[in-house]
Image (cartoon, rainbow, N blue to C red):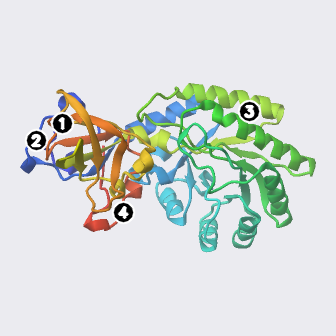
Amino acid sequence: MTITEPAAAAVATTSPEAMSRPTVMALPSTPFLEVETSVVTDRLGELAAALPGIAIHYAVKANPHPQVLAAVVAAGGNFDVASPTEVRACLAAGAAPDDLVYSNPVKRRDHVAESAALGVRIFVVDSPAEVRKVAEAAPGAAVLCRLVTSGDGSDWPLSRKYGCSVGQAVDILRLAVALGLDAAGVSFHVGSQQRDPNAWRSPIAAAATVFEAVRADGLSPWLLDLGGGFPARHEGDIPPLAAYGAVIEDQLRQSFGEHRPRTIAEPGRAVVGDAGALVTSVVGVVERGDNRWVYLDAGVFTGLVETLDEAIRYRIETSADGGPTGPCVLAGPTCDSADVLYQVTPVHLPLDLAEGDIVRLESAGAYTSCYSTVGFNGFDPLPVVVG
């Protein structure tokens, strides 16, 4: 695209060299998210190559756009869902109910029943109360028990909201069988944007301990869910996907030997993150004491929630690139004081960046359009342009 093209004509392949500096009156209607579905297809292929024999279940919550889901189906992928709305979206995209795993460990009872009625048969739990809920709302379903992990090594840890200990997991799976459910196995999540492939070692070993304990009781667990956490190209170095696959394969071999279960993974960011760029405009540049503040027309409440606590740091390009740069605080457009993207660690942007210039946050295809707030301060949800 060129900078002055309308949003509806945008394509996700803009390079910094192709960007020209617009006039304020020539601005496209920003902000919006560009998504290139060919990158989704490529990333699925790369994950399949790095994780041979492991079924890929795309985490719909990362980006539920219908064309993204259709690309996953076309590439032979499956889905990780967390609501009946996501279930229906996957079925509409061409998935079969057997392609879905409902991974939210704590869920509304009516959502369990509705999803089961749509054909979903595998639900994740992490407490006795959730096992009983599934047994009552989806009799005969299969359950995976989610183990807690430390989240160490990830940019966005998920360590304490969900998950239980090995001993608790054994008891939960025993209870599942007593209630007429299929005690399918174990799941875990090592934290989003996980930069350390070795983060999978300890939970795989813990899962094997659970499998061994319940097998001793005569149960037959058959499924291990490795969760997500595989990274996108945000700021900082990340290992190649092959490094993750090598560690996971080695640990599966060590922990399970000849008794290796069927194994799945639930990547979201690694599938769609690099497929997208959030395109936004500068609405103001203000000098405040020793700090230069750059205000964008997208912020924490309009797609960039993962910048809270500066957890996820996006790579940034602008239409003013090429000249000298300096540190600045980057902020969003709303009047909420929390709407600041990067302040503790400022970003370096062109010194002559001005109102009307375009700022692109790269590898922003995941957890942006799905987390924009409807109506906050009168700002619309983030539009998506698919190429």
Q: Nearer the viewer, residue 219 or 171?
A: 171
What amino acid is at disc 2? Pro
Task: Please report whichever mark, 1 or 3, sits nearer to the chain's N-terminal start.
Answer: 3
Residue drawn where x is 65% and y is 44% of the image? 150
Above or below for 344 versus 333: above
Task: Please report whichever mark, 2 or 4, sits nearer to the chain's N-terminal start.
Answer: 2
Task: Please report whichever mark, 3 or 2, sits nearer to the chain's N-terminal start.
Answer: 2
In whole angstroms, how far apart are the C-alphas of marks 1 and 4?
Answer: 27 Å
Task: Please report whichever mark, 2 or 1, sits nearer to the chain's N-terminal start.
Answer: 2
Above or below for 372 versus 250: below
What amino acid is at disc 4? Thr
Q: Give left or right: position of 336 versus 223.
A: left
State the SS at label 1.
loop
Q: Which residue is mark 3?
A: 252
Q: Which residue is mark 1?
A: 319
* Total residue callouts: 4
Q: Residues within 10 Å of mark 2 (few under 14, many from 20)?
A: some
What amino acid is at disc 3? Leu
- Labelled pair 2, 1 in contact (Cβ < 8 Å): yes
Q: Nearer the viewer, mark 3 or mark 4?
A: 4
Percent of width and height locating residue 50: 58, 29
- Residue 46 visible in this rendered orientation of the protein: yes
In whole angstroms, how far apart are the C-alphas of marks 2 and 4?
Answer: 28 Å
Q: Which residue is mark 2?
A: 22
Q: Residue furthest front?
A: 289
Q: Quadrant of the C terminus?
A: top left
Percent of width and height locating residue 170: 83, 53
Q: Quadrant of the N terminus?
A: top left
User: In the image, which disc is placed on residue 369?
Assistant: none
Q: Which residue is mark 4?
A: 373
State the SS at label 3.
helix
Residue drawn where x is 46% and y is 54% of the image? 93
